[in-house]
Image (cartoon, rainbow, N blue to C red):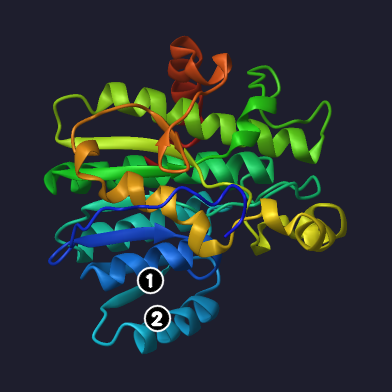
Amino acid sequence: MGLFGSGKCTSKATLEGKTVLITGANTGIGYETAKDLLKRGARIIMACRNVDRAKSAARELQKEVLGGEIRVVELNLASLKSVKECANDILASEPKIHLLINNAGVMACPYTKTEDGLEMQFQTNHLGHFLLTNLLLPKIKESAPARIINVSALAHRAGRVNFDDLQSTRSYNSVIAYSTSKLCNLLFTLELQERLKNTGVVTYALHPGVVATELGRHTPCGCGWLFQRLGCFIKTPVQGAQTTLHCALDEQLAEQNEFYFSDCKPAHVSARASNKDDAKKLWEVSEELVKSYL
């Protein structure tokens, strides 16, 4: 176990009869999260961009968890049209969604615009999940008690939401853009908590740790050299999934409690991440950007 791998989900909760939707569940911590929840009896919906890879991952999971029920749906967070189509499919076919885990993401990729004309990291890491969550929210509320878990990162501390240049058209630094998208995850969670009061739905954000996954493929040398040299500091995907599982399962978190977690315990956020005015403004700006799909 790595130096920072001490956090472990200790909940014994079972999820028989519960439906869980996880974005980006075909690899990394999303895959390990799906495996753990599948073992607890949950029905898993893997929402992934690459359907073939997701189906292959689903087959592997079903080998490990005999009798586990898994559904694969296509979800490209870099396409608002895809997000809308995925949500429509889920709303039409699923009676309940008890747990939504917004896990998928990209990290430090070169400057790229999505088909919607938006910066890739902002849309994939924040706006796509913002739209998906809002579209599924009526179903999630009907399924209460329910939870929404947003995977953020410690990197949010380096982020800064510039409302005059959200799409980084004036200047672009891939690492800062990633950090800003993770800050957006926290501001989204902060405002979502306000809007979910008295609904039976709770929401938490988390830092999974520095995890050896494919996420670092766009960083210098793909992070491979870093994982080799700093192995004692790097979590495995199983270790990286623990805080997601804690937020999803811990019985004490069934009522809205705290906001942001790391290593399965409450953690501090930057002052910018706890700015309620910015959280409200980001919500309003995000709503405007996706209004034709709501």
In the rendered view of the protein, which quadrant contains the C terminus? top left
Q: Closer to the camera, 18 or 212? A: 212
Give the tally of numbered discs.
Answer: 2
- Residue displayed at 26% across by 44% down: 147
Q: Position of residue 30 (x, y in %)?
A: 47, 61
- Amino acid beneath label 2: Leu
In the rendered image of this protein, does residue 101 appear above or below residue 156? below
Q: Is residue 186 visible?
A: yes
Q: Secondary structure at mark 1?
A: helix
The numbered dot on residue 252 is none
- Residue displayed at 52% across by 23% down: 269
- Amino acid beneath label 1: Lys
Q: Position of residue 138 (x, y in %)?
A: 20, 42
Q: Quadrant of residue 172?
A: top right
Q: Position of residue 155 (x, y in %)?
A: 65, 35
Q: Quadrant of residue 38?
A: bottom left
Q: Which residue is mark 1?
A: 35
- Dot 2 and dot 1 residues touching (CB under 8 Å): yes
Q: Which residue is mark 2?
A: 61
Residue 266 lies left or right of residue 157; in this view the side is: left
- Residue displayed at 23% across by 86% down: 67
Residue 166 lies left or right of residue 284; in this view the side is: right
Q: Secondary structure at mark 2?
A: helix
Residue 63 lies left or right of residue 40; in this view the side is: right
